[in-house]
Image (cartoon, rainbow, N blue to C red):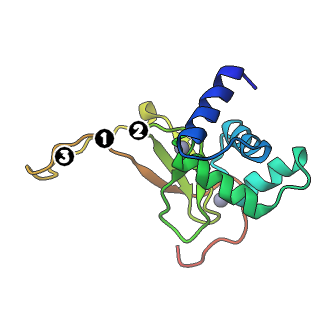
Amino acid sequence: MIHKLDNALQRSLHERGRRMTRQRRAVHDAVLASRDHPSAEEVFQRVRRKLPDVSLATVYNSLEALVECGQISKVPRSDQGPARYSHRLDVHHHARCVSCGKVWDVDEESLDVQPRNIGVRFRPVAFKVEMLVECPGNCGSRRSSR
Ligand SMILES: [Zn+2]
Ligand SMILES: [Zn+2]
């Protein structure tokens, strides 16, 4: 891992009275290397390959500490699925599978969406689109109600 990044992570943890630990760094690295908005459980599976002794609770706590420090972000939930985490801190669009809850990033260029007639009181600052999709292929049992 790049030292500069390490220092930034260490500093932001330190500013909030938290220490850099091996586990926190591994959790940070795992989220940074992920493009699929992993859940805590999925991050746990990935970190475990490097740190076999790590617990799910430690991974969960590390994720929350990193979110608090603004190093990673939590993907807002629109379903009952688990919380998901991302290395991206900017406002961007998502596609979410209605069956398994997995989330993908959607490029701005691939959407042609403009806010219209939203009322004169609002001054749009940014907007996020969440497209509900079905995974390509089989991702588990489909919900019959949809
Ligand atoms: Zn799916
Ligand atoms: Zn995203």
* Residue linked to disc 2: 111
Which mark is in front, 1 or 3? 1
| Label 1, residues with CA under 10 Å away: few <14, some 14-19, many ≥20 | few
Q: CA distance from mark 1 to mark 3?
A: 13 Å
Q: Earlier in the sequence, mark 1 or mark 2?
A: 2
**C-alpha span from label 3 to label 2:** 15 Å
Instruction: Say left or right for 63 vs 67.
Output: right
Q: Secondary structure at mark 3?
A: loop
Residue 18: percent from left, percent from top: 62, 47
How dense is the environment of label 2, judged by Cα within 10 Å: few (below 14), some, or many (20 and up)? few
Q: Is residue 25 above or below residue 58?
A: above
| Rendered residue at 49%/47% (across/down) | 94
Which residue is at a point 47% across and 64% down the rendered structure image? Answer: 78
> Which amino acid does the dot numbered 1 rest on?
Ala
Ligand 1: image quarter: bottom right
**Lower sequence index among marks 3 and 2:** 2
Q: Could you say whether the residue bearing mark 2 is in a helix, strand or loop?
A: loop
Residue at 59 percent of width and 39 percent of height: 14
Ligand 2 closer than 8 Å to label 2 CB: no
Residue at the (44%, 40%) spot, across then down: 92
Q: What residue would you read off at disc 1?
A: 126
- Residue at the spot of label 3: 116
Q: Is residue 107 above or below residue 36?
A: above
Which amino acid type corresponds to the residue marked 2 in the rendered image? Leu
**Residue 88, how many percent across, how many down?**
54, 38
- Could you say which is closer to the camera, residue 17 or residue 145? 17
Mark pair 1, 2: CA separation: 14 Å
